Image (tube, rainbow, N blue to C red):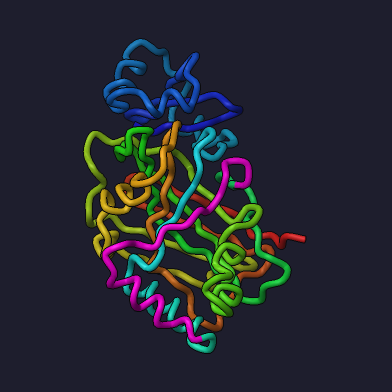
Amino acid sequence: MKLYKISDSVYIEYQQQVYPAAGQHWDELVNAVDLYVHLQSLVATATPVGDAGWLHSQQMQAPLGTQEIWAAGVTYLRSKEARMEESKLSGGADFYAKVYEAERPELFFKSTASRCAGPGEAVYIRSDSHWNVPEPELTLFANRHGKIVGYTIGNDMSSRDIEGENPLYLPQAKCYERSAAIGPCLWVPGHPIHPDAKIRMQISRNAAQVFSGEISINQMKRKQDELINYLFRAMHFEQGAYLMTGTCLVPPNDFTLQPGDIVSITIDGIGMLENKVEQLN
């Protein structure tokens, strides 16, 4: 089952057919008791409006209502190494080595719903940064009870030079207008995502590929439930929350995004999230 938002209405894709979730408000729908079973019941009584071709001809919105987006860092070995590289001159490299091995994960606030980009929308790079990268991440949705019920694709846009200058600058490197994108849907399977599912990212510039990579989510050091349990440990999320789970696909140190670049991220079972890069003035 996949949930999409189109023109503020909710649609369910199931077995190549698309059904309207008539009268369903996003926040309440995604917090339904046993969401997968609830979606099955909605499909059973609805008339399809089209097939997958119809769906992909529509302008999709980010699959969220009023939920906050949070993120976890240093969950893959490559991420630890990249953070250490960018922070070595500031003396902050040891912090990232320690958090990779620590019991407590690194969690930080990423975006409100209003600042998030959806499929096909622009993501931004800061005008006061000269080293900017996308970070493709499996993104969990946990309902108001802290139970993981769905997955989407996240792009955790990052200003590596600002973050590397001082670890305390992390919020400025990570949290700004359109620094997060999620989509294209909220995938609600009847079972947890397969541990061998792959994340792939391609970056194109002037119609030429300038970066490509893939990684299996089984390379993540932290467990998904572990990350959600820490996020909900001292906070209540009335409508649930999204959590980006970190990245292992890091472009080389001489790479930085430029306005006009196209970032395409795919995750097995979920689909593709594509965004164009623009500079934030």
Asked whether, in this view, residue 178 is left or right of residue 88, the answer is right
Q: Residue furthest right?
A: 281
| Residue 42, image x, y percentages | 36, 16
The N terminus lies in which quarter of the figure?
top left
Of 143 and 199, the residue lying toward us: 143
The part of the image, by quadrant, that contains residue 141 is top left
Q: Magenta span covers which residues?
A: 91-115
> Which residue appears farthest toward the top when viewing the image?
45
Q: Position of residue 92 (x, y in %)?
A: 47, 81
Instruction: Out of 276 and 92, give the one closest to the viewer.
Output: 92
Q: Position of residue 144 (x, y in %)?
A: 38, 33
Residue extending farthest front: 234
Residue at horizontal 37 percent and vertical 49 percent from the top: 231
**Residue visible at 36% across and 39% down?**
142
Total marks in image: 0
* Position above or below: 248 against 267: below
* Location of residue 191 in the rendering, given as x and y in whole percent from the top left corner: 22, 38
Judge whether residue 126 is colored magenta: no
